[in-house]
Image (cartoon, rainbow, N blue to C red):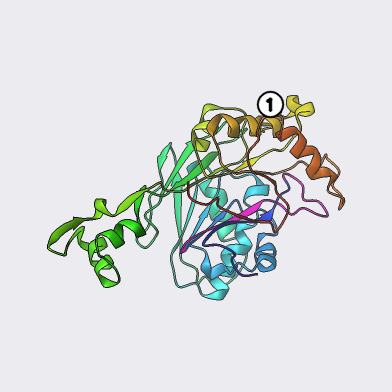
Amino acid sequence: MPRTSPRELVVLGTASQVPTKRRNHNGYVLHWDDETILFDPGEGTQRQMTQAGVAAPDLTRIAITHLHGDHSLGLAGVVQRISLDGSPREVPISFPASGEQWIRNLCDSTAFHHREQMLLQGLEADGRVERLPGESGTTLTLRRLDHTIEAFGYRLDEPDGRSFDTTKLAEAGLSGPAVGRLQRDGVIESDGRLVHLADVTVPRRGQSMAFVMDTRLCDAAGELADGVDLLVIEATFLDSDRHLATEYGHLTARQAAEIAAAAGVRHLVLTHFSQRYPDSENGEFEQVFEAEAREAYDGPLTIARDLDRVTLPPRR
């Protein structure tokens, strides 16, 4: 299936601990211009990538929030597929450093010809994730979440920039190659006067996305979500089972929606649903989760299904 936008989320799976007949284990691909980031590849991710038309050699990074199986068991198959397909690039795997032995086990779990180029990037503290040469100018940051084992959430931010104003360009008598020179040099002469880049552009706010998986309510979840264009967040339980969410280190749909509302999120995606809630083709499952989320959040909302595609909202 071809991409519908330069920046979009492809949902590979939406189940939590146990996959169901209709929902695969976790797995999410973020297309961001020339980057393709795979988040939390649970069991069955390789097949779901095929279903979604995501090629393993296109992956530029794998980011894992924690080392529970529903967020990582698919890594073995994905790494072997990268090897089989002969990906020409080095692919970093970001993960909590405390889980390095499990990551190494998954990357070398069976016999295969190791042609992959994987860079293991163990993470130990909040802050920026080191980016490789060739990755975009966006920043990738992480915050420690509150789960039953060490877990991090991720946030991707594009720097603010400026966009050309066509009316101002016309008034300045600029078009064609002259616009390119202005963008490169920051100033150009036109009709006997100097035109600076700021004279013919307007501020352009960078886009952002946050990925928050298994966690109880915590400040870090809100910090990651603050003002993002797209928030992908777990909603394992309904609020009637809030005691289970607290016990097992998860959020309810209402709690996730409250985080989004408080943070000013522009588009909310709920996922990572418990198998305890019966799913069916009539959409009742999604309606129940949506109704609960709507008690706290009134913006664009997606109750994720496997193989959904969610485009980032247009720029502000």
Residue at 55% across / 62% down in the picture? 5
Q: Where is residue 182? Give x, y as percent.
A: 23, 62
Q: Is residue 252 visible?
A: no
Q: Where is residue 91? Give x, y as percent.
A: 46, 62
In this rendering, the answer to whether 156 lies above or below 109 is above
Q: Is residue 298 left or right of residue 161?
A: right
Q: Is residue 250 left or right of residue 188?
A: right
Q: Is residue 80 left or right of residue 167?
A: right
Residue at 86% across / 53% down in the picture? 281
Q: 266 and 215: which one is in front?
A: 266
Question: Which region is colored magenta?
Answer: 16-34
Residue found at the far left of this picture: 192
In this rendering, the answer to whether 93 lies above or below 173 is above
Residue at 83% across / 48% down in the picture? 283
- Magenta segment: does it hold 21? yes
In this rendering, the answer to whether 316 lies above or below 174 is above
Q: 85 and 217: which one is in front?
A: 217
Secondary structure at numbered mark 1: helix
User: Which residue does the numbered mark 1 point to in the structure image?
Assistant: 246
- Magenta segment: does it hold 69? no
Q: 96 and 302: which one is in front?
A: 302
